[in-house]
Image (tube, helix red, strand yellow):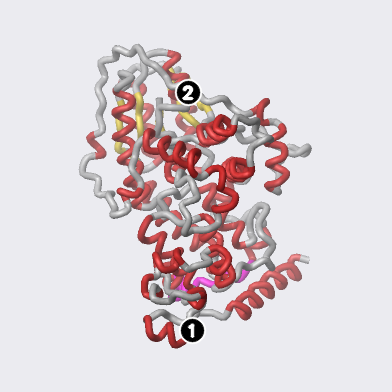
Amino acid sequence: MWFRADLRVADNPALYQACQADEVVAVYCLTQTQWDQHGVSRVQRSLIVRQIECLRLELEALNIPLIVLDCGTFERAVPAIVGLVEELSVETLFFNAQYELNEERMSREVQFELQSKGCDAHMLHDQCLISPGGVMTGKQTVPKVFSAFKRRYLADFYQLARAMAPKPTSRSTISVVSDVASLEGLSVSTPCDELWPAGENEAFARLEKFGEMRLRFYSRDRDHPARAATSTLSPYLAVGIISTAQCLYFALESEQASIDALGEGAQVWVSELIWRDFYRHVLWSRPDLCRHKPYKKETDALPWSSDAEAFEIWKEGRTGFPLVDAAMRQLKQTGWMHNRLRMVVAMFLTKHLNIDWRLGEAYFMSALVDADFASNNGGWQWSASTGVDAVPYFRIFNPIRQSERFDECGEFIRTFVPELGQIVDKTIHNPRLDQRARFGYPEMMVDHAKATANTKAMFKALSVVAK
């Protein structure tokens, strides 16, 4: 069993099938150089490493040893897996698919190399409930609009969605022992680690707490960052500690309802889970997205700025827009950002500062504990109006209005921009010049009206050129 972004025992189709077949040895390829090349955040690396130790204990309870191969890159992982297969006289390799370009190429190379040596290599699908290729238009393309994708997804759900894989059992008496020595001495711990404990039990406890206390009110509260309204499961989904299937079937069971008859809160949450699948289907159909290309190809001609100084101010949370700054500081302090705020700060970077969305996308990958290429790329291109089913270019969030609507009392701002903590009235959303001077808070780096007018002109000019 080759573990990848599926670091769990429960609902793991490849692991279950491996255990059904014979005695099992598990392998994980540590690829730190590849992590560097892909900009994987340190906080996510820490979660992965801590989860591998949890996984080792779970597997050993099933008499399954775990071997961690220190490979550096995906390219070196292929011969490492082949070598281990030959060393242990393995007859069959099981693994779950990944849809990113480099990961998908590695899957094909491993299958080719093993099959040329007489070893079967079976790839299963665990990330999506309906595998890519299952939700298509009449022209056999992935729908370009989420609402159309969702309609087809829901209509075909009970016919095409995979069932959860049972938790495996093992009668293995294999003499191979676990070897995770390559994890020893890795310097990946961060101050955020205590916010994101590893383990399948932790992930499922969060899911149960969300179901008991927040699911019912999710649609009402989810856009308000000061409220404890979300599941906080995204880091666990990103590295495969819990699956989308576990989450969605949990919602169905909690509501005792079919997928088209859920309560409002569960309905909205399930829609968010379907967005995850949507972006993977899109990525599967458009591998050029992994090469920094926009979904809307014509937008590659937009004259984005690469203003390094403005980019640093945005990253540090010193823009002079309190909600934007609070969100960016939340990211730096916790390794996570509320979803509403991800849209606000992404739209600020691209449509107020006109900075290339790819710079923001890369920064998020380097900072987020829940960094996930498909969802991160989809979200950034949505905000920049370059992606699939993206927000129209002329729809631009006003950060002050967003603050007034979703952080009404300024509670979230005060938490992460403490220099404004003494402001108790609504001016916290846009402090007066005298307040900014008194508390050492910067003036707004751009004027909202002028910046948005410039962005609209930029996109209009592109439309004229395209015609």
Q: Residues within 10 Å of mark 1 (few under 14, many from 20)?
A: few
Q: Residues within 10 Å of mark 2 (few under 14, many from 20)?
A: many
Going 26% across and 39% down the picture, which residue do you hit?
183
Residue 280 position within the rendered picture, expressed as x and y whole percent measured from the top left: 58, 42
Mark before the other along the chain sequence, 1 or 2:
2
Which amino acid type corresponds to the residue marked 1 in the rendered image? Arg
Disc 1 target residue: 432
Answer whether residue 307 is magenta in the image. Answer: yes
The secondary element bearing badge 2 is classed as strand
Which amino acid type corresponds to the residue marked 2 in the rendered image? Ala
| Closer to the camera in the image, 308 or 412 | 412
Q: Is residue 138 visible?
A: yes
The secondary element bearing badge 1 is classed as loop
* Cα distance between the residues tagged 1 and 2: 64 Å
Going 73% across and 44% down the picture, which residue do you hit?
148
- Relative to 461, does residue 93 appear above or below in the rendering? above
| Closer to the camera in the image, 86 or 316 | 316
Residue 115 position within the rendered picture, expressed as x and y whole percent measured from the top left: 48, 22
First to last magenta residue range: 302-311
From the viewer's perspective, tell me whether residue 174 is left or right of residue 382.
left
Q: Report the mark closest to the observer, 1 or 2.
A: 1
From the viewer's perspective, tell me whether residue 63 is left or right of residue 407.
left
Residue 268 position within the rendered picture, expressed as x and y whole percent measured from the top left: 61, 45
Disc 2 target residue: 121
From the viewer's perspective, tell me whether residue 176 is left or right of residue 260.
left
Quarter of the image where one finds residue 118: top left
- Outermost residue, left direction? 185
Going 68% across and 69% down the picture, which residue do you hit?
459
| Closer to the camera in the image, 373 or 396 | 396
